[in-house]
């Protein structure tokens, strides 16, 4: 459902103190209930064997470690215990210093955690199934989260006060970092600048009506109170159907203008009427939005052109390709005939993209083409395309100005990590730590 301009396929910066994520609610659920198997005592905090077991099981699953490989599993267990001790040291210190977390802060953290889990489950039904499997209700889940999240918030406050607030990074620091580490920084990938001529396969009125009628029935079911996510899984023709229609967080400008305009008119929780795009009829549900973008779910009923319409579009694209071969300029053909109006107004120009991020069919079509050359007719999901390679830029080093903001964060994180490790070592010297076994 994305425009061609979004055919591209972050760097996660960790805080100095790394708590084990609430990777799933069983971690919070079981650990709080276990009363036996204390592995370690850290000040006034304890670490239970059940906590270690769950973290190890989750890590092995994510890292694809065979649970029978005792060497790797034991190494993971030692690493996890060490990190949990470090986290408990910080939490213990925060409590000693009488730091507190407000009820508002804690409530918001719990809401965010539950919301994140629900999002990963894909639908309310799957979320409820997971709760049932663990013998929990949502109320009990929130209660289980409460203690762990309070500890994390306390630790974060202490780290903010003792580490983050005391570190300053100047422009000179960033420039020095760039000069000294330039050879180790990632390279800017090879890019290609493309122009396009687009011909869409137009569905006839009968096909359009059939799709609209189906979409209206789904919209009616939503209006009657049926679950949006369940209907998406059952009726949507988009790949997001398996996630209850969830397409995730979208940056502004990434989807078609009509879709985005309809989405942004919604408030969180609201559902749109039918929204027509080149793909078909959409029903959009807003999850959340901000100045940068929005998070939506949608149901798509595709309008599938007939074989005759597909053939007509292909033939028309072939005809336009012949005009270019005969000497008519690509830009003029795009302006006169391309059905992507936005790029047509610019002589077909759509922009520059990393080569490795292009859709496979586009990447294959332009492979080996020099600047100024034109591809044959390329079939894509949204019609038939002819591409012109307007320019090519080889892989190169980033300039300082291109990445100075990211470099500032790298310098800050490196200094925070170093300062944190020194600070943690000092606190550990003053903290009672008794490891009983893992």
Image: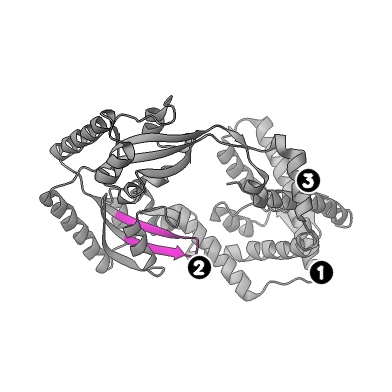
**Residue 401 x %, y %:** 65, 48
Picture quadrant where residue 266 is located: bottom left
Residue at image mark 3: 176
- Examine the rendering and report whether any part of residue 61 can be seen: yes
- What residue is shown with label 2? 139
Which label sits in the foreground, 2 or 3? Answer: 3
* Picture coordinates of residue 139, whole percent (x, y): 50, 68
Question: If you read the primary sequence from the N terminus, does the residue marked by circle 2 or circle 3 appear first?
Answer: 2
Closest to the observer: 425 or 176? 176
Q: How many neighbours does mark 3 have within 10 angstroms: few (below 14), some (14-19), or many (20 or more)? A: few
Other residues around mark 1 within 10 Å, as few (<14) / some (14–19) / many (≥20)? few
The residue under the point 54% across, 53% down is 24
What residue do we see at 67% from left, 45% from top?
A: 400
Residue denoted by label 1 = 97
Q: CA distance from mark 2 to mark 3?
A: 52 Å
Q: Is the C terminus in the top left, top right, bottom left or bottom right quadrant? A: top right
Q: Secondary structure at mark 1?
A: loop
Q: Where 38 sits versus 61, above or below?
A: below
């Amino acid at each position: 459902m994305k425009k061609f301009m979004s055919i591209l396929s972050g760097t996660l910066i960790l805080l100095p103190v790394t708590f084990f994520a609430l990777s799933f609610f069983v971690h919070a659920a079981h650990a709080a209930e276990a009363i036996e198997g204390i592995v370690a005592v850290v000040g006034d905090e304890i670490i239970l064997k059940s906590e270690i077991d769950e973290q190890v099981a989750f890590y092995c699953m994510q890292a694809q470690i065979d649970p029978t490989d005792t060497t790797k599993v034991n190494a993971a267990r030692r690493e996890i215990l060490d990190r949990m001790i470090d986290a408990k040291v910080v939490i213990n210190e925060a409590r000693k210093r009488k730091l507190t977390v407000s009820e508002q802060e804690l409530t918001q953290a719990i809401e965010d955690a539950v919301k994140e889990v629900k999002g990963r489950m894909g639908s309310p039904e799957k979320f409820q199934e997971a709760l049932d499997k663990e013998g929990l209700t949502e109320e009990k889940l929130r209660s289980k989260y409460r203690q762990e999240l309070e500890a994390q918030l306390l630790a974060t406050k202490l780290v903010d006060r003792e580490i983050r607030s005391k570190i300053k990074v100047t422009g000179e620091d960033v420039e020095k970092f760039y000069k000294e580490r330039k050879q180790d920084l990632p390279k800017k990938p090879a890019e290609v600048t493309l122009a396009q001529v687009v011909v869409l396969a137009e569905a006839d009125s009968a096909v359009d009506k059939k799709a609209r009628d189906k979409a209206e029935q789904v919209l009616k079911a939503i209006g009657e109170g049926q679950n949006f996510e369940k209907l998406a899984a059952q009726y949507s023709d988009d790949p997001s159907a398996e996630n209850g229609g969830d397409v995730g967080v979208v940056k502004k400008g990434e989807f078609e203008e009509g879709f985005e305009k309809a989405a942004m008119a919604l408030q969180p929780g609201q559902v749109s009427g039918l929204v027509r795009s080149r793909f078909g009829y959409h029903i959009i549900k807003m999850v959340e939005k901000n100045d940068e973008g929005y998070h939506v779910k949608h149901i798509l009923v595709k309008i599938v052109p007939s074989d005759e319409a597909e053939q007509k579009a292909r033939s028309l694209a072939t005809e336009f390709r012949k005009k270019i071969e005969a000497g008519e300029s690509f830009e003029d053909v795009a302006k006169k005939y391309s059905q992507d109006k936005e790029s047509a107004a610019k002589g077909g120009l759509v922009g520059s993209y990393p080569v490795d991020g292009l859709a496979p069919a586009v990447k294959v079509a332009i492979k080996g083409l020099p600047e100024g050359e034109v591809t044959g007719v390329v079939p894509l999901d949204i019609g038939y395309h002819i591409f012109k390679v307007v320019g090519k830029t080889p892989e190169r080093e980033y300039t300082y100005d291109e990445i100075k903001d990211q470099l500032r964060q790298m310098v800050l994180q490196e200094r925070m990590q170093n300062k944190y490790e020194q600070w943690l070592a000092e606190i550990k010297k003053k903290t009672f730590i008794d490891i009983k076994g893992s």
